[in-house]
Amino acid sequence: MYRILLVDDDPHIIKTNSVFLKRQGYQVISAENGADALKISSSAALDAIVLDVDMPGADGIAVCRKIREISSVPIIFLSAYARTDDRIRGLMAGGDDYLGKPYSLTELELRIRLRIQRRLNQEIREVLRFGLLEIDLGLQEVRYQNNTIPFSTLEFNLLAFLAQNPGQVFSYEQLYDRVWKSPVNKGIHNIQVCMARVRQKLDQLCPDIHYIETVRRKGYRFVGED
């Protein structure tokens, strides 16, 4: 199930889009302003964002620029203005697509799905490299100097997420939300155990290098080699 954030200051548009997308099998979160959108996008795992351009306060262009500082999630702009200059502004700000109002809900869903699938296909082909460490997102394999240790799916997803965001500090709560894509609950213990296993396996694979660093009272971050 893909998780979509809808951002629009018009409650009617939020409700109409939300009802339609939920019927198509999406999980939908909504925000009525840029400030709430930024809070959600910085703490929740999202597969795509549908972002209105014309909002009071921080408009969609400004919100998009801020989101791009922390995430590469696909962003589809919605706007009553469909002039070429407006489209260029949206794309230059980091948007992936631009749909003028009024629009077909079917077309909106199609654009969302295509953008998500394109991103997933790009990630599947990707191999993250940090010195001699390779994290193969397609094969879900971790290699170091041609040696490998099996990681469970959850262990690999946790390591891959940290490695895709090197240098950024994430708490247990954030990791649980972004990797498991679920609200934090008693399952927080699961990610603590999983993190311990990931670190143990990395220590076995490359004992002289510590790729995951503990930041006291804040969480963990991945530290890669140049």
Image (cartoon, grey):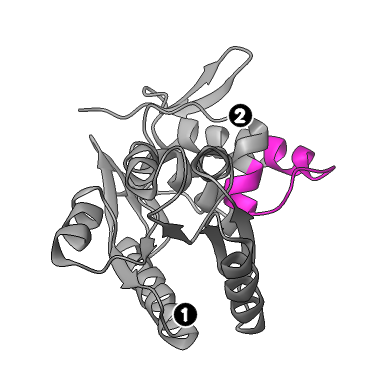
Q: Is residue 153 left or right of residue 15?
A: left
Is 62 or 132 nearer to us in this picture? Answer: 62
Element marked by disc 2: loop
* Residue 52 occupies quadrant: bottom left
Looking at the rendered structure, which numbered label has been put on residue 109?
1
* Residue 176 occupies quadrant: top right
Residue identifier under label 2: 171
Q: Position of residue 54 (x, y in %)?
A: 40, 53
Q: Image height check: is 172 above or below 149? A: above
**The magenta stretch spans which residues?**
176-193
Q: Is residue 130 magenta?
A: no
The residue depicted at 62 percent of the width and 68 percent of the height is: 12
Q: Position of residue 157 (x, y in %)?
A: 52, 52
Q: Position of residue 199 (x, y in %)?
A: 54, 33
The reply to whether the C-beta atoms of the residues labelled 1 and 2 are less than 8 Å apart is no
Is 60 or 221 nearer to us in this picture? Answer: 60
Q: Amino acid at mark 2?
A: Ser
Q: Quadrant of the C terminus?
A: top left
